[in-house]
Image (cartoon, rainbow, N blue to C red):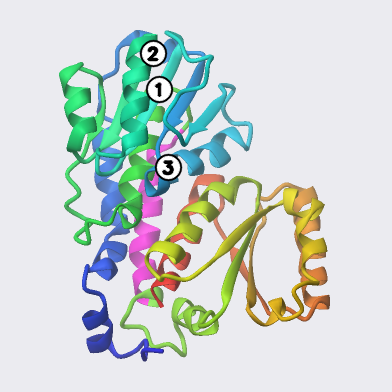
């Protein structure tokens, strides 16, 4: 394993400049929020009855995070559905807000949904950096967020998460679909800027939580354990383990996992030597899920599987999210 304090070796391995993209997460959020929240939408776009968000892979990070953050926490009263295929749900009509999400703009499944949404007369908006989707949105004069990813030098969609998450939050807030306090966005940006000292590449491994975890996860299968409003964020962290670190990883959410996962820890017999469970704790979890989280930790320990517990100290649902993502984004690079 590369010495995580050897910046010369790290730069040599980081041929696509992923590290700089991660460091610019605060700038991505700042740009995406200010630009997306300034978009003007027709009044009839604010009167829709349901939302279908179309996207694949890294382009769904924003959708998944928003669904678990707002819809899952019962903050929104409007159904939000994720569409990860070539076709839309049968209920989509003129009263549906269809959001087309593709970082590159060339995701074939999303383009197929775009054409169908137009045929059904849905209210269409989009978020993309260009490609076929940008052309489609411009040609049909659909109000959208087409961004210039100046703060993602790696050009990797999965590391441009600030654009896809905050761009979507900004548009939905502008439409009045979700409540967002602009002052809280500023606090998030300030917080993330400050964390660069503790989690950055210049902080030595002996004091850097991200580097410490990266070392522990060598030759292991990370199993990310969360509850309720962090389920979407867990997906957004699991995928980069696959794509960037080339490392198999899993995520599970309480309470659903309690109905199957723990019964599957016995076989194969050598499974335990590969697993490493990471439990993310939050005071904002539902009190029933907090109890389940502790019971789950106890069961995993009883199975002699190594674990790590990480407490997230955000004072609100939205503020907890960047605490989670900044720490875990830094880890998978190790």
Q: Looking at the image, do the residues carrying marks 1 and 2 touch, with CB atoms under 8 Å apart?
A: yes
Distance CA(mark 1)–CA(mark 3): 13 Å
Marks 3 and 2, how far apart at CA: 20 Å
Q: Is residue 179 above or below residue 212?
A: above
For label 3, the residue is 60
Secondary structure of the residue carrying numbered label 2 = loop
Q: How crowded is mark 3: few (under 14 residues within 10 Å), some or many (20 or more)?
A: many
Label located before the other in sequence (3 or 2): 3
Closer to the camera, 224 or 186?
224
Q: Is the magenta stretch mostly helix, strand or loop?
A: helix
Dot 1: within a 10 Å radius of its alpha carbon, few (fewer than 14), some, or many (20 or more) residues?
Answer: many
Q: Mark 1 points at which residue?
A: 98
**Which numbered circle lies on residue 3?**
none
Which residue bears the numbered disc 2? 122
- Magenta stretch: includes residue 202: no
Q: Is residue 184 visible?
A: no
**In the picture shown, does residue 326 fall above or below 274?**
above
Q: Where is residue 54 in the image (x, y as percent from the top left)?
A: 41, 32
Q: Position of residue 76 (x, y in %)?
A: 56, 27
Q: What element does badge 1 sit on?
A: strand
* Rendered view: 323 above or below 48: below
Which stretch appears magenta? 180-197
């Amino acid at each position: 394993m590369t010495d995580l304090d050897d910046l010369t070796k790290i730069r040599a391995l980081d041929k696509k400049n992923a590290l700089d993209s991660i460091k610019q997460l605060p700038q991505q959020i700042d740009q995406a929020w200010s630009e997306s929240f300034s978009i003007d939408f027709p009044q009839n776009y604010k009167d829709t009855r349901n939302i279908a968000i179309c996207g694949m892979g890294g382009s769904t990070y924003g959708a998944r995070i928003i669904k678990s953050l707002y819809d899952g926490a019962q903050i929104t009263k409007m159904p939000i559905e994720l569409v990860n295929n070539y076709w839309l749900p049968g209920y989509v009509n003129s009263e549906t807000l269809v959001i087309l999400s593709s970082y590159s703009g060339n995701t074939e499944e999303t383009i197929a949904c775009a054409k169908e949404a137009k045929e059904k007369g849905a209210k269409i908006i989009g978020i993309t950096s260009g490609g076929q989707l940008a052309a489609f949105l411009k040609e049909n004069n659909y109000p959208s967020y087409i961004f210039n990813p100046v703060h993602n030098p790696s050009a990797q969609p999965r590391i441009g998460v600030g654009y896809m998450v905050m761009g979507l939050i900004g548009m939905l807030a502008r439409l009045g679909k979700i409540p967002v306090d602009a002052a809280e966005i500023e606090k998030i940006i300030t917080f993330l800027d400050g964390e660069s000292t503790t989690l950055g590449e210049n902080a030595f491994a002996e004091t850097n939580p991200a580097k410490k975890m990266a070392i522990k996860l060598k030759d292991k299968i990370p199993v990310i354990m969360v509850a309720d409003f962090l389920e979407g964020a867990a997906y957004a962290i699991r995928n980069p383990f696959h794509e960037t670190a080339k490392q198999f990883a899993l995520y599970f959410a309480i309470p659903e996992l309690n109905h199957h996962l723990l019964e599957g820890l016995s076989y194969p017999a050598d499974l335990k030597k590969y697993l490493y469970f990471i439990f993310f704790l939050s005071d904002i979890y539902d009190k029933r899920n907090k109890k389940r989280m502790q019971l789950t930790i106890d069961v995993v320990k009883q199975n002699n599987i190594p674990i790590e517990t990480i407490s997230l100290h955000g004072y609100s649902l939205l503020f907890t999210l960047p605490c989670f993502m900044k720490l875990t984004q830094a880890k998978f690079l190790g």
